Amino acid sequence: MKKFNYFLFLMLVAITLTFASCSKKAQETSTTDSTVSTEKVVEKPKTIDLKVGMVTDAGTIDDKSFNQGTWEGIVRAGNDFGFTPKYIKPAGTTEADYIAGVSDLADSGYNMIITPGFKFETTIYKAQDQYPNVKFVLLDGVPHPGDYNVVIRDNTVAVSWAEQESGFVAAVAAALKMPNSKFGFVGGMEIPAVQKFNWGWQQGIKYANENLGTNVSIAQEDCLYSGSFSDVALGQQMAATMFDRGVDVIFAAAGGVGVGVINEGKSQRTSGKDKWVVGVDIDQYADGVMPNGESCILTSAMKYLDRASYDMIKDELDGTFPGGTAIQLTAKENGVGIPASNPNLSDAIQAECNKVMDKMKSGEIVVAAEALPGLWK
């Protein structure tokens, strides 16, 4: 009987071990199958074969304006989509310098190159044929051989903005903040993008005076172009002169020259004067911060540069790159505007500006992209 019990015991152990082994294998098979099923359902990030580069315009990658806004969008796309972008600052600002920068990236395997500014127009005109397998994004310009006969190849997209609309709403915000004041404008080079900021600014002043009860003036002598995007000292000198003759708010659409205007704005407010600066392209509030923690930036007339560079990269990854086209971003596409909030603007002013934006989106307000009669050029 003991032998039988012992034999029975051994049989039970063997059966148990066999069952456990089968159960474990079944569990392992189930887990593996589940993992495979999960991998089919959850879409993995794409493995991308995209190298994105940028060639800067006059100025630096941290110019607080056009270059910086463009680069920030590229960097954000790199973080989101898993690539490391590169930028090149050309040795100079001639076409030969820009072509060298573009060629450096293209010859190094960069298959998407983003260039900010009209100075790249003739460069991209040539590069799009020289490098047909590279995608080019030209911001604020259109490719042409120097005679403005535009040619946009299938590997190129040209992006522009309705700067006049952001200048308009920035003027409304400034007028509501300083309803009985003198305004001024400092531009960089006298090119269409900068001119449109100026003309929108003046139309916004007129709108606020006629519809919102303000009494703002702007004189011809206070609408000036510096002829530069990089001369910081010149910008500060121009701003000081305007402020000294009674201007209260200066809209600076001038790149590095605008940095000088902001510096003077900080100096004026630090000394107790109620003077303000309106920034451009990106939200420049932080650039106007003074030792007391406040900022001289009343608001900023923004072009969402980062969105444009980011979206063009995303389109390329999605297979929807809009090559061969010229795109203009307006209020309707949320391509322009002012920051959603600024400590220097009340909620009531911000709400009024939102109404203006809505009217531009609906077409109730149309802002001209040229110098209308009565506007200073």
Image (cartoon, helix red, strand yellow):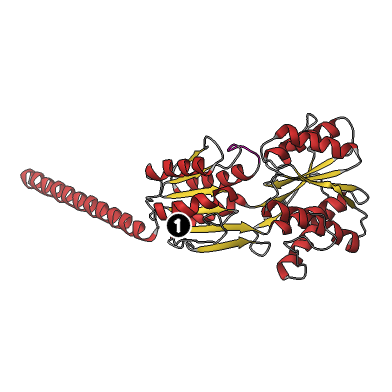
Q: Which residues are magenta?
A: 60-64
Residue drawn 84% across and 55% down? 348
Residue drawn 53% across and 48% down? 115
Residue drawn 34% across and 60% down? 40
Give residue 234's quadrant in the image. top right
**Residue 104 image position (x, y, % from top left):** 42, 40
Above or below: residue 284 compared with residue 213: above
**Residue 339 image position (x, y, % from top left):** 72, 50
Give residue 148's quadrant in the image. bottom right
* Residue nearer the viewer, 199 or 248: 199
**Residue 375 image position (x, y, % from top left):** 83, 58
Name the chief secondary structure element in magenta. loop
Residue drawn 13% across and 46% down? 9
Residue indicated by mark 1:
316
User: Could you tell me the amino acid type at mark 1?
Assistant: Glu
Left or right position of 19 against 206: left
Left or right position of 129 against 69: left
* Residue nearer the viewer, 47 or 174: 174
